[in-house]
Amino acid sequence: AQKVTQAQTEISVVEKEDVTLDCVYETRDTTYYLFWYKQPPSGELVFLIRRNSFDEQNEISGRYSWNFQKSTSSFNFTITASQVVDSAVYFCALMIWSGGGADGLTFGKGTHLIIQP
Amino acid sequence: NAGVTQTPKFRILKIGQSMTLQCTQDMNHNYMYWYRQDPGMGLKLIYYSVGAGITDKGEVPNGYNVSRSTTEDFPLRLELAAPSQTSVYFCASTDRAYEQYFGPGTRLTVT
């Protein structure tokens, strides 16, 4: 069975600080995908990034960056120079792509990020 | 292109009532999913479908039923609603292991 752990329940930082959200996953499958989603107070789920298990390159998108390390089964997310608009709940998720199709996402419990002005 | 649409947005049910949550996607995706999100928790998979006529249970299927008669629609049926089914329900679709497109959610309260 798959599992995603986001150990940080809530993080509070002051605007412009850098912040890293941790994600650790467990799976015995060799082909899988990792995702990050943002859920603002309005409640919708906003896709941020997808990574497959064969691509360990780190990725940067503006103020966002992701560090994928298979050796430690981690897929951490860093926001540089945080802004108040970054305040949200962030979910890390795992999908196993088995031979018959996709079995859905396994989500972590989420990290509530509060950016104080 | 509306993406994934869900109706209703909000609903209050009495214990023992039944209802159907509607989900429609216009992206011709084969894969569709239903998740529930309890307060302070991540989403959990209820049911999924890999194509019309094919459905399978996820992690928390008890108390729910689904059907998939067309590619576009994937309704979720609650029979005999219970307070434990108070949650936010999200429908999603995907065409492979790419981004899962989520609907806006249905907030359901059972009292």
Image (cartoon, coloured by chain):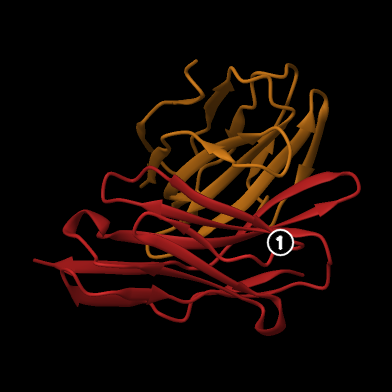
Instruction: Residue lying at the far left in this picture: please name it.
Output: A117
| Image quadrant in which you'd find residue B34 | top right
- Residue B4: give x, y in percent of width and height: 52, 26
Residue occupied by mark 1: A55
Residue B35 at x, y = what percent? Answer: 57, 47
In the rendered view, does A96 fall on the left or right side of A43?
A: right
At 69% from the left edge and 26% from the top edge, which residue is drawn? B29
What letter labels the chain drawn in orange? B
> Could you say which is closer to the camera, residue B105 or residue B16?
B105
- x, y percentage for residue A52? 70, 57
Q: In this view, does A88 lie above or below B1?
A: below
Count of numbered circles on the image: 1
Image point (64%, 39%), residue name: B33
Residue at point 38%, 42% (across, down): A44
Q: Which amino acid does label 1 sit on?
A: Asp
**Could you tell me which chain the residue with mark 1 belongs to?**
A
Q: Residue at x 62, y 34 (%)?
A: B93
Residue B98 location, quadrant: top right
Looking at the image, which residue sits at the far right?
Answer: A99
On screen, A33 above or below B11? Answer: below
As drawn, the chain in red is A
SS class, disc 1 = loop
